[in-house]
Amino acid sequence: MNSYNKQALDIIAKEQGFIRDNLEKVMRLVEILNYFHDSPLLSKSLVLKGGTAINLTVFQLPRLSVDIDLDFTVDCDRESMLSIRQEVNNEILRYMESDGYHLAPGSKTPHTLDSWVFHYTNAAGNNDGIKIEINYSDRCHILPAIETHVSIPFLSDVKVRSLSPVELFATKINALIGRSAARDIYDVYNMVKHQLFV
């Protein structure tokens, strides 16, 4: 795990207009995503979606999305999915623990969703957490996943396998209709503003 310096984070956060602790969290997310990309098992089994995918791969981080939402993408029967799911879980939990994160007691793994919160102590000495969710029911996507090289000056370079932009925003519009969260409005506004699908 990288070490994070409070003073250095303060400088970057001030320059970029972000809250320092959220900036550190995004830096940690990128580090985790880099591991996922480099893992043969995780890179072929999972695809990034949601606000983190949109703001990293499409918009170059106008807002800090602070969780990792993934879909399982292997086209297989239920028994094979359950077997691969266990392998995926084991690898993620092993990596996160080896990198100094601690699984929160409130984490849950209901029928088709793994939802984990990993605690850590941030550069300011405060307790914080990173949420990782994997959806195992949305396995069949209309368009192929894409791989994007993300290069943002104050973040480590990372390659990310994500849903195609069309599907990213289709799911975002669906979320906007379903929950009307401010972050959904913001992301859809940027989609319209940048005329992504004109």
Image (tube, rainbow, N blue to C red):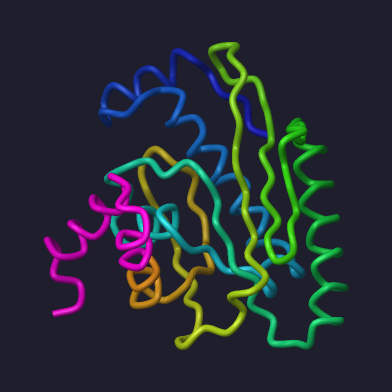
Question: Residue 82 falls in which quadrant of the image?
Answer: bottom right
Question: Residue 43 falls in which quadrant of the image?
Answer: bottom right
* Residue beneath the point at 79% across and 77% down: 81
Residue 4 lies, in percent from the top left, at: 56, 24
Q: Nearer the viewer, residue 77 or 102?
A: 77
Quadrant location of the C terminus?
bottom left
Q: Nearer the viewer, residue 184 or 180?
A: 180
Q: Nearer the viewer, residue 146 or 192?
A: 192
* Residue beneath the point at 34% across and 77% down: 166
Q: Is residue 177 magenta?
A: yes
Residue 154 lies, in percent from the top left, at: 39, 38
Quadrant location of the N terminus?
top right
* Residue beneath the point at 21% across and 64% down: 191
For the stretch drawn in magenta, the main secondary structure is helix
| Residues rendered magenta in the picture | 172-198
Number of marks in the image?
A: 0
Residue 170 lies, in percent from the top left, at: 35, 73
Outermost residue toward the front? 178
Whether 9 is drawn above or below 100: the answer is above
Residue 130 lies, in percent from the top left, at: 60, 38
Instruction: Indicate left or right for 109 with 46 as reference.
Output: right
Whether 146 is drawn above or below 157: the answer is below
Q: Is residue 147 magenta?
A: no
* Residue beneath the point at 36% across and 24% down: 19
